[in-house]
Image (cartoon, helix red, strand yellow):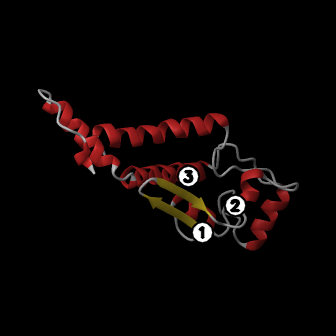
């Protein structure tokens, strides 16, 4: 794949850098794996901090949790399936990395209720899909990819 760059006369360092970039662009699986790692770290932190953006539970929910024997669990944890899927890729978690794409998240059937809320339950976003959150994530993940392509880091 890297052989399409012709050496530039008198500038071996520049040519070597271009050849390295071309070789790394052959697949994006390595930086995408780092993006997934970052996503999992963000989710682990969000769950550890119980938010941001997570309202306190209603008294009726707290009572139900205590009656069910999981009253000492964090705000949105009953089975830990959802947190495990997002922070560790376990259970409902999924990760699909191809040479030029990455998808990760959860297929937990109840995840959407937590993300957007219901008439009886406040939203407790699992993923920060606000404009500022998306922009910050795009910048962070862009830097991971840029480091890989241009500096050969990772």
| Label 1 with label 2: CB-CB less than 8 Å | yes
Between label 3 and label 2, give the one nearer the viewer. 2
Out of 2 and 122, give the one closest to the viewer. Answer: 2
Residue drawn 27% across the image and 48% down it: 23
Q: Tell me the element at label 2.
A: helix
Instruction: Give the Cα separation between the discs numbered 1 and 2.
Output: 10 Å
Q: Which mark is on residue 130?
A: none
Q: Is residue 149 left or right of residue 129?
A: left
Instruction: Give the Cα separation between the discs numbered 3 and 2.
Output: 13 Å
Q: Which residue is disc 1 drawn over?
A: 92
Q: Which residue is disc 2 drawn over?
A: 111
Q: Is residue 122 left or right of residue 51?
A: right
Residue drawn 79% across the image and 53% down it: 117
Q: Which residue of the protein is positioned furthest toward the left in this rendering?
A: 10
| Label 3 with label 2: CB-CB less than 8 Å | no
Q: Position of residue 94 (x, y in %)?
A: 54, 65
- Asked if one can make out residue 80 in the rendered structure from this viewpoint, the answer is no
Q: Which mark is on residue 43?
A: 3
Residue drawn 28% across the image and 51% down it: 1
Q: Residues within 10 Å of mark 3 (few under 14, many from 20)?
A: many
First of labels 1, 2 by sequence position: 1
Q: Residues within 10 Å of mark 2 (few under 14, many from 20)?
A: some
Report the number of numbered marks: 3
Q: Tell me the element at label 3.
A: helix
């Amino acid at each position: 794949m890297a052989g399409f760059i012709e050496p530039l006369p008198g500038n071996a360092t520049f040519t070597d850098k271009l050849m390295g970039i071309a070789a790394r662009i052959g697949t994006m699986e390595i930086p995408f794996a780092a993006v997934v790692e970052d996503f999992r770290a963000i989710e682990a932190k969000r769950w550890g901090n119980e938010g941001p953006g997570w309202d306190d539970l209603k008294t009726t929910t707290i009572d139900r949790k205590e009656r069910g024997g999981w009253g000492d669990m964090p705000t949105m944890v009953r089975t830990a399936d959802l947190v495990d899927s997002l922070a560790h890729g376990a259970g409902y978690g999924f990760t699909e990395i191809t040479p030029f794409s990455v998808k990760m998240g959860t297929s937990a059937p109840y995840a959407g209720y937590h993300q957007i809320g219901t008439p009886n339950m406040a939203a407790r976003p699992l993923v920060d899909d606000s404009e500022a959150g998306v922009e910050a994530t795009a910048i962070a993940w862009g830097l991971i990819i840029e480091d890989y392509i241009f500096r050969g880091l990772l």
